[in-house]
Amino acid sequence: MADLLWDDVKCFFDLDLMGSLPDERIPDASVEVWQAVLDLVAERGWKYQYSEGELVLPVPRAEAVLSRPADAECPDLRVWPTADVLAIFRFHAADEVDFDVDLRELQGQERLDVFSGFLREIGRRLGRPVLMDPEGDYGHPVLGFDVDADRVVLLADPQVR
């Protein structure tokens, strides 16, 4: 059974309302949480690519990435949970795992199920919520993985949008 039904949440995947790149985040993180995300990506066999600027490199340990100089370029990790859904993790800070998805890739029930499954796998591994905020509206999640419910749930009323 699907965590969310497309007809109930499609407003949160509307490019005009949400922007094309909503913000996904795991608050109250740490270097260890980041490392658990990196380990999960490798263990699940998802296709991925780590880069610093234009340079593609092997994925380092989270501690090495997050201890780079303040003026260094922010690395990213591109993860494809399926061939046509991309999540881009950005190593801005140790205290929050931050990543983006493109809503154009998440239209319809099938893609929503892929996205929900991705959030669920991360949230279960970490035992933490994984939240989605509208682009530019940080701190107002509309949906996310709920640890207690063990599924992705609505966190905002779709009728308000």
Image: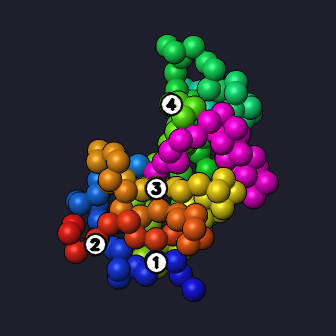
Q: Where does the image place residue 143, in percent across and percent down from the top left?
A: 41, 64
Numbered tag placed on residue 131 in the rendering:
3
Please tell me which residue is depicted at 79% across the width and 54% down the height of the picture.
Answer: 43
**Which residue is labeled 4 in the image?**
92
Cα distance in 3D space between marks 2 and 4: 30 Å
Please give the range of residues in magenta.
24-49
Looking at the rendered structure, the kind of residue marked 4 is His
> Is label 1 in a helix, a strand or a loop?
loop
Residue marked by disc 1:
4
Circle 2 residue = 158
Is residue 43 part of the magenta span, yes or no? yes
**Dot 4 or dot 3, earlier in sequence:** 4
Label 2 crowding class (10 Å Cα cut-off): few <14, some 14-19, many 20+?
few
Identify the residue shown where x is 70% and y is 24%.
Answer: 64
Can residue 57 be seen here? The reply is no
Q: Position of residue 140 (x, y in %)?
A: 32, 53
